[in-house]
């Protein structure tokens, strides 16, 4: 049986394989290349018009923007890239702005306004290359008329703490901002748009990824109100936000553009990388390391601490089916955390803490839960380990202390004290979260 250090090294290598497979610059090169006076984009050949503009938004926008500069060369008229603070790279012809995530700040509002101002220069015969990765919703949070930045911040915090999933989050946010829900497609119409996406949502729904700035919006004001009611946060939503949503549900505020709107006639979307590609790379790497690999087809979702236990149970059952060989059980997706405490952590750290508590007495199991963007919630960690060392570290804190940390949603503090945080720094990509559970045959220590 491997030592804890060896097991963590194996898990880190698998994580590295996942991230490498979905790096935005490489993903862009796979689906776009220049052919003289034309662009090849996912099987489509487009003649390069008078001006090509690049709009890159999200945690992985910087490497996509830089690669677009290399591919387009002198055909690039200019552009704008908006990234999370600390996720930037040096660019040549594309202007770079940094903003806040997951809760927007004044930089986010300024970035959203700058984006709208830039798009005013797009002519009808131009081509807009929209390079979109997860995180764009908060990074371009420019409030709708009648709303303030504080209104968006209060709403975002309430949704994040309620356990709302990304679809619910974006259904609300798309009706409060000037960028999401197809509004950018309307802003540049009738120019051609090719949106190349790195997906951070289950199902790769183009209307949900980054709040679908160039995609038709199937959600409504009424649905937004239903999300708030279902999550029980009406009393925590700013009055101006509720007023706008209610007015929209009554038909007094125009809806976001829907699929039949003519502004989408010249818009095409391409998924360049997603969680499935990351998991496939992990599986290939694990097989090369001698593991029997099982990849869970069901995405991780729902409450983080519950999802962690479900994953461990599935991994145990898979191991017991053929227990003579080391197993690597893989899964991907995005869970949620209903925040009831006052601690600090993220969904992956909460999964790791819940898993560590559940693994007491199981010395042959090691697990890693991590966000592919390198940041888990509002923390500097990508996630955490659950193994016999983290269990020992937690138990050393005292009886019942780990459980109290979990109840206070303070997984980050608990894992830090146990020496079980997984820290990578920004990866500049984002395809949700990945988990790897390694189970080995029991041997005497």
Image: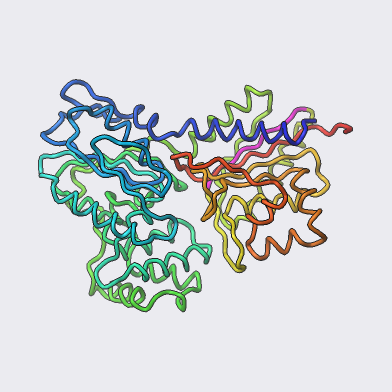
Please state if 38 lies on the left or on the right of 238 as rendered: left
Please state if 216 lies on the left or on the right of 390 as rendered: left
How many marks are shown on the rendered structure?
0
Please state if 58 lies on the left or on the right of 14 as rendered: left
In the image, 393 versus 35, the foreground residue is: 393
Query: Magenta span has 315?
Result: no
- Which residue is drawn at the image coordinates 37% and 70% (left, top)? 150
In the image, 392 versus 212, the foreground residue is: 392
Q: State whether residue 338 is above or below residue 215.
A: below
Q: Where residue 211 sits: x, y (%)?
A: 35, 54
Please state if 431 lies on the left or on the right of 55 as rendered: right
Q: State whether residue 359 is above or below residue 170.
A: above
In the image, 220 versus 370, the foreground residue is: 370
Q: Where residue 75 sits: x, y (%)?
A: 17, 30
Q: Quadrant of residue 73?
A: top left
Secondary structure predominantly adopted by residues drawn in magenta: strand
Q: Where residue 50 sits: x, y (%)?
A: 10, 34
Q: Quadrant of the C terminus?
A: top right
Q: Where residue 28 sits: x, y (%)?
A: 35, 32
- Which residue is drawn at the image coordinates 28% and 27% (left, top)? 70
Q: Quadrant of residue 62?
A: top left
Query: Magenta span has 326?
Result: yes
Q: Quadrant of the N terminus?
A: top right
Q: How is the image coloured?
A: rainbow
Q: Which residues are magenta?
A: 325-333
- Which residue is drawn at the image coordinates 17% and 49% (left, top)? 188
- Which residue is drawn at the image coordinates 47% and 47% (left, top)? 202
């Amino acid at each position: 049986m491997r030592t804890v250090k060896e097991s963590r090294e194996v898990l880190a290598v698998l994580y590295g394989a996942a991230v490498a497979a979905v790096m935005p610059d490489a993903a862009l090169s796979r689906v776009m290349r220049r052919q003289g006076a034309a662009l090849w984009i996912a099987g489509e050949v487009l003649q390069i018009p008078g001006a090509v503009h690049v709009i890159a938004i999200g945690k992985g926008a910087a490497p996509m923007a830089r690669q677009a500069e290399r591919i387009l060369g002198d055909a690039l008229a200019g552009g704008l890239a908006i990234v999370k603070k600390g996720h930037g790279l040096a660019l040549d012809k594309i202007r770079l702005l940094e903003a806040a995530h997951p809760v927007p700040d004044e930089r986010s509002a300024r970035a959203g306004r700058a984006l709208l101002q830039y798009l005013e220069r797009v002519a009808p015969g131009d081509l807009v290359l929209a390079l979109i990765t997860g995180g764009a919703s908060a990074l371009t949070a420019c409030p709708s008329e009648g709303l303030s930045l504080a209104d968006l911040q209060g709403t975002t915090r309430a949704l994040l703490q309620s356990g709302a999933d990304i679809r619910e989050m974006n259904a609300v946010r798309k009706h409060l901002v000037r960028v999401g829900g197809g509004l950018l497609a309307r802003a540049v119409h009738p120019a051609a748009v090719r949106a190349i996406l790195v997906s951070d949502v289950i199902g790769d729904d183009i209307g949900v990824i980054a709040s679908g700035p160039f995609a038709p919006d199937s959600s409504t004001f009424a649905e937004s109100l239903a999300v708030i009611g279902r999550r029980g946060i009406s009393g925590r939503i700013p009055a101006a936000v509720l007023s706008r949503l209610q007015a929209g549900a009554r038909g007094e505020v125009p809806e976001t553009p829907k699929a039949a709107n003519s502004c989408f006639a010249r818009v095409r979307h391409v998924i360049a990388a997603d969680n499935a590609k990351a998991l496939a790379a992990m599986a290939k790497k694990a097989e090369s390391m001698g593991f029997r690999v099982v990849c869970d087809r069901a995405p991780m979702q729902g409450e983080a601490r519950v999802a962690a236990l479900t994953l461990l149970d599935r991994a145990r059952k898979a191991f017991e089916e053929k227990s003579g060989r080391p197993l690597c059980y893989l899964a991907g997706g995005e869970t949620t955390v209903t925040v009831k405490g006052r601690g600090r952590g993220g969904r992956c750290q909460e999964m790791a803490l819940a898993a560590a508590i559940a693994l007491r007495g199981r010395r042959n199991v090691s697990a890693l839960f991590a966000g592919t963007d390198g940041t888990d919630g509002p923390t500097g960690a990508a996630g955490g380990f659950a193994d016999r060392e983290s269990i020992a570290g937690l138990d050393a804190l005292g009886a019942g202390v780990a459980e109290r940390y979990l109840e206070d949603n303070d997984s980050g503090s608990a894992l830090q004290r146990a020496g079980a945080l997984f820290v990578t720094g920004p990866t500049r990509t984002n395809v949700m979260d990945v988990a790897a559970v390694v189970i080995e045959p029991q041997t005497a220590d």
